[in-house]
Structures are given as structure tokens and as C-alpha cells.
Image (spheres, rainbow, N blue to C red):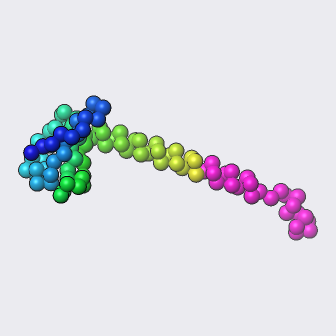
Amino acid sequence: MYFMYTLYRRYIMTRVSVAEARRDLAGIINRVSIARERVVISRHDTDVAAVISIDDLRLLDALMDKWEDEQDIADCEAALLEAREDRVSWEDIKTEFGL
């Protein structure tokens, strides 16, 4: 038996057991692809997987790429700041090596 447990924004999220998912995979795929429902699959009352539409997957991938890009930019900015703090002037190098 399907248990609808969350209405998140405009998405309905339904929770089913692994056994129910096996019995009604075609129905789950139809609800996900047509009704844009999200289905969480659980085993022994623990959520283990989710079935989402391909549009939601593409959106999730795009958001993850954006987040990773932002993290990379922040890491680069921190590295540049650190490099600027550790900089030694050319005059100091020449003096150190007697040039």
C-alpha cells in the first residue's frame, strides 16, 4: 500500500517498500514521469532509494555542477590569497643569494 507522506512545494512524495516497488514498477514509473510524483523506496522502514523524473535528475545534476563550481572558485580564491601572503619580493631573493 502506498503511503503519501509529504507534499513538498508542488511535488507529491510517496513512500513504498521494496516489495511494493517490485510489484508495481511500471505504475511507479508512470506516476513519476507523468504526474511528476517522487517515490521513495524503503527497506525495513529505512529510505534506501528514490525514483524521480528525468527532468528532476537533470535539474539536480545542474545544481550539483553549479555548487561544485562555486566550491572550486572559493578554493581558488583562498589559494590565491594564501599565495599573495607568502610572496617574497624579487629584491629579497637577490639579496639572499648575493645577486
Name the image quarter holding residue 91: bottom right
Q: Residue at x 88, y 67 (%)?
A: 96
Q: Residue furthest top?
A: 10
x then y, percent, for residue 35: 19, 33
Is residue 79 left or right of 66 when viewed as pictured? Answer: right
Counting from the top left corner in percent of width and height, residue 88 is at: 80, 58
Q: Is residue 53 visible?
A: yes
- Among all residues in the image, which is located at the extreme bottom? 97
Please state the horizontal and vertical placement of residue 74, each as a whole percent of the image. Answer: 58, 47
Question: Is residue 93 toward the left or the right of residue 54 in the image?
Answer: right
Q: Main secondary structure of the magenta part?
A: helix
| Left or right relative to 66: residue 19 | left
Residue 70: x and y in percent read 52, 44
**In this view, 69 is above or below 43:** above
Please count the marks in the image: 0
Front one among 9 and 97: 9
- Asked if residue 84 lies in the magenta stretch, the reply is yes
For the point 22% across and 35% down, the residue is 12
Q: Where does the C terminus fall, quadrant-wise?
A: bottom right
Residue 94 in magenta stretch: yes
* Residue 13: quarter of image: top left
Q: Nearer the viewer, residue 94 or 31?
A: 31
Quadrant housing the N terminus: top left
Residue at point 27%, 41% (across, down): 54
Magenta part of the protein: which range? 76-99
Task: Confirm whether residue 26 shows in the render.
Answer: no
Q: Residue at x 84, y 58 (%)?
A: 90
